[in-house]
Amino acid sequence: MAKTKLENLKLGIFVVLGTALLVVATYLIGNRQNMFGKTIPISAIFKNANGLQNGNNVRFSGIKVGTVNKIEMINDTTIRVHMIIEEKVKNHIKKDAVATIGSDGLVGSMLINIVPGEGKSAHIELGDELQSFSRVATQDMLNTLNQTNENAALLTQDLLKVTRSLTQGKGTFGRLLNDSLMAKDLHQTIANLKHTSSEANKMIVQINQIVKQLDFENSATGVLLKDSISGNKMRNVISHLENSSLEIEKMSMNLNAVIGDIKTGKGAINYLATDTVLVRQLETSMENVTEGVKNFNEVTEALKHNFLTRRYFKKKEKEKKMELEKIDEQTP
Amino acid sequence: MGNTSTLFKGMKEFFMEIGDLSHFAARFFKEVLKPPFEFKELMRQCYQMGNRSLTLVTVTGFIIGLVLTLQSRPTLIQFGAVSWMPNMVGISIVREIGPVITALICAGRIASGIGAELGSMRVTEQIDAMEVSGTNPFKYLVITRIMATTLMLPILVIYGDLVALYGSALVENLKGGVSFQLYFNTVFDALSFSDLVPATIKSFFFGFAIGLVGCYKGYYSKKGTAGVGVAANTAVVMASLLLFVIDFIAVFISDIFYEL
């Protein structure tokens, strides 16, 4: 009898423990699906559910706050996802929070991530609809990747061409890489540059010494360097010089035009410069003029001796004499 | 010709067996709700089948969890998915391995025990004596045993699941440095009612099948003392086979209800 009682006790313990385990497991599973405790329903509209299922987790800033309750197709591009979230996080989620569909790791199950909003909006309430952001679908990603691959292929082709040209010594870089003479030249150039720079260095030292020796206070250099009035004057001079050079330029242009006219035109100067016949004619005319003048002189001389005009000429000589005497008196 | 007749004979025996078993099950359902109820005997049988199987289920469950985790680790490490170990092991143990292994262990231990016990009672004409003395042997021997297995197996399965998960967690803790808290958190995160409910309901059917086959084979054993051995042996074989058939049907039904 005692044995039976002990057996019954053991059996009771076993059954109670087993049932308790079942209850605990049920509670743990149910609790994780927000079956117990206070919850509020909210929803979000997506274009693509991306394989989301009832019971998938809802996370807010990475913390599990609820589960997907129902997925409802409104039309071919609108899917409403109903979620239940713990009431205690209601005060942390704002109305402008954004719901996105993501996955738990690379191969994990799908979930909804609620990204916090700006923080200025009010808290969510029962039955609110959150904004949603549809993530890039795998197919879109693959399409982009395909485009990138094609571009990469083109790039590698171009690179191949470039490297071939380089190895064959074509172009500046190719020559730089392959031409030993050029390398020697470059080496020499660099050596020269080095030498030049050292010379320049020495020169700068010498100039420094000269500059140190300069009397900035009293010398013309000092005045040139320091005197602002002289500077202004210099500036004026330079501006005048500039104006003058402009005027000279204009003048030279005019001269050029005149010369051009002379060269091309039919004026007297052009004839003088170019027509040899005219020159001869002119020469002949001049000879005739000279001869004419000689004859005229002779006529004038004859007139001087003529009784009609002799008086006039004498009067002229008298006046001349008078003028000469006046000049002699004035000079000391 | 001889082969064909043997085949027909075999098929006929198979269908007759199924028919007898169905008849036996129908008799159980007919008599289970009728008084008098043999509570004391039911308690005794529950103790015998539940508590006495506990050690066996503990050892088996622990080793199964341990081995499953150890064997899966290299592959999961190759995929870089070793953090999914609790999810994988948790779901496979709760959904399938826990109930089936526990049921098979019980089929081996309980079905053979019942078959041998009832068989020897039949052979030694104890059952006939009970009938003569006015006690309903079916109520006293069969219903109590079938009820005991049906009620005890789900509890054993829950217990076995826990031990197996503990074995798995131990390996993860020792090899992967995963804390027990994180392990069980991940397991319960991965589990849902669609895993636990069908498995628990299935366990009742497993228990029923084990008790039914054990009692049927023992109750109708023949051919003297040799029949006792045959009854025990065939009880185990038939119960194990029936377990897989029930498992197969259960998966289909749970798929309809839960879209696994």
Image (cartoon, rainbow, N blue to C red):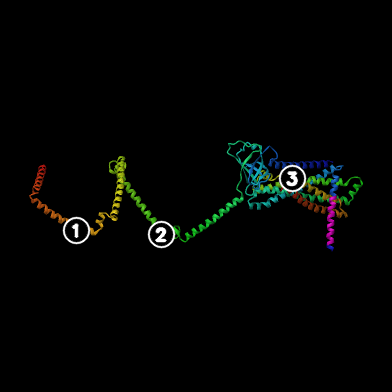
Give the number of the disc on residue A208: none
A250 left or right of B240 in image? left
User: What's the amino acid at mark 2?
Assistant: Lys
Which region is colored magenta? B4-23
Q: In the rendered structure, does residue A102 fall within the stretch colored magenta? A: no
User: Where does the C terminus of chain A fall, quadrant-wise?
Assistant: top left
Q: Circle 3 sits on which residue?
A: B197
Look at the numbered disc 1 and give the secondary structure of its residue: helix
A30 left or right of A244 in image? right
- For the residues beneath circles 1 and 3, the answer to whether they share a chain is no
User: What's the amino acid at mark 3?
Assistant: Val
Closest to the camera, between mark 3 and mark 2, is 3
Q: Nearer the viewer, residue B139 or B21?
A: B21
Look at the numbered disc 3 and give the secondary structure of its residue: helix
Look at the numbered disc 2 and give the secondary structure of its residue: helix
Q: In the rendered structure, does residue B13 fall within the stretch colored magenta? A: yes
B121 left or right of A249 in image? right
Quarter of the view holding residue A5:
top right
- For the residues beneath circles 1 and 2, the answer to whether they share a chain is yes
Q: Check the residue under mark 2 and report the chain it is in.
A: A
Q: Check the residue under mark 1 and report the chain it is in.
A: A
Q: Circle 2 sits on which residue?
A: A184
Give the number of the disc on residue A284: 1
Residue shown at 82% from the left, 54% from the top: B234
User: What's the amino acid at mark 1?
Assistant: Thr
Q: Dot 3: within a 10 Å radius of its alpha carbon, few (fewer than 14), some, or many (20 or more) residues?
A: some
